[in-house]
Amino acid sequence: MEAHGDRNWLRGDPSWWGLGSKQNPPLIRNSEIYIPSSLGTPSSEHRFGWARQRMRPLAWPILKPVAWSPFFLLSSIFPLIFTGNTPDDQFVSGALFIISWILLIVPVSNARNAQPTSSDNLLILPIDWVLLSVGCLLFLSHIYYSPLLGWVAYAVFWTAFLRSIKMISEVFSIPPARIIAPLERSTWDSRYLPERWEVHSQSWKRGKISSTSIGEGKLVLYGFTRENTDFISISYICKFGFVQDCLFDSHPHSYEIIKVLREPDFDFSQVEWPMELIVFDEEE
C-alpha cells in the first residue's frame, strides 16, 4: 500500500490521483490537517520533524471486485427459481453465493493486510458477521423445518451484505495515512510516555511499541527502518483494523490526536530526514 520509489514514498504515487508521473502530489491535500508547527515538518531549510505518509487509496484494490459481488449474490437465487437449467441447481446456486461473499471479503481483507501497521484480526473486518451467521443458521434450518426459512435466510444475507457495504463506506470516508519521524533508537524509552499509553516495548523496536485507545479505535506507535534510518510512526487504527489519516477534517478524533502529538515525548527534532526520502515544494 506504500508508493514505490523513494521520491513518492511520503506524498504517494501521483497516479493514485490522476497526476502525471513527473508531477509531485501537494504537501497538503483537501481536508488534510497540517501537522502542528511545534513539531516541525521537513523542508529544504529544516529537515527535521514529523511528516505524513500517504498510503494507496482503498478504492484501487476494492471497488471492482466489490462491485461484482451483488451480481453473484443476486444470481445465486436464479437456479433455485428456474430449476432444471443447470446440471446441479443447488450446487450452482451455492457456488454463486460463495463467490459473492469471496468478492466482498477477500479484497477488503487483502487491502487492509497490505497497509503497514494495520490489524490482522479477521473478525473486525467491516463485515456484518452476526447477520451473516444468522443467515447461515436459517439456511441450515430450512433443510429440516420449512423451505420458507430458506427465503428468510436469503433476505438476511442481503441485509448483511448491505450493512457490510455501509461499513466499508465508513472506512472509505477517511484516507489511509500515518505520521512518521526519524529518530535515534537509543534515545527512545517508553517509560516516559504518559499514563494513558499501554507499553508493549520499553525500548525502540521494529513493530508495535505502544498504543492508547481513542474513540472506537487505537493510536499506535510502531518502529520501522528504511534507508538505514530508524523511524517511529503514529497510526490511527479504526475499529475495523484499517489505518486512517489521524489528521483529517472528518476524522472525529483528530483534535484529540493533535493534543497527544504536542506532548514533549513526541518532539523528535534531533535526527535529520534522509534527503532521498522527502520532496521539497521548491522542486515542483
Image: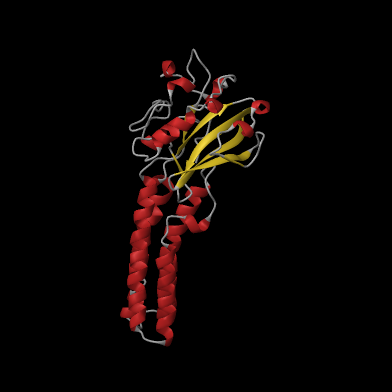
Q: Picture quarter containing residue 76?
A: bottom left
Q: Is residue 127 above or below residue 180?
A: below
Who's the residue at 42% across and 35% down the image? 256
Q: How many marks?
A: 0
Who's the residue at 54% across and 42% down the image? 117
Q: Is residue 215 above or below residue 248?
A: below
Q: Position of residue 222 (x, y in %)?
A: 58, 37
Who's the residue at 43% across and 37% down the image? 245
Q: Position of residue 277 (x, y in %)?
A: 54, 25
Nearer-the-camera pick, 256 or 30: 256
Q: Is residue 177 above or below residue 79?
A: above
* Residue 165 visible: yes
* Residue 88 visible: no
Q: Position of residue 139 (x, y in %)?
A: 41, 77
Q: Is residue 279 above or below residue 115?
A: above
Q: Position of residue 20 (x, y in %)?
A: 39, 30
Q: Picture quarter containing residue 68?
A: bottom left
The residue lying furthest to the top in this view is 45
Q: Picture quarter containing residue 18?
A: top left
Nearer-the-camera pick, 14 or 235: 235
Who's the residue at 51% across and 23% down the image? 278
Image position of 205 (left or right of 267)? right
Image quarter of the C terminus = top left
The residue lying furthest to the front in this view is 195
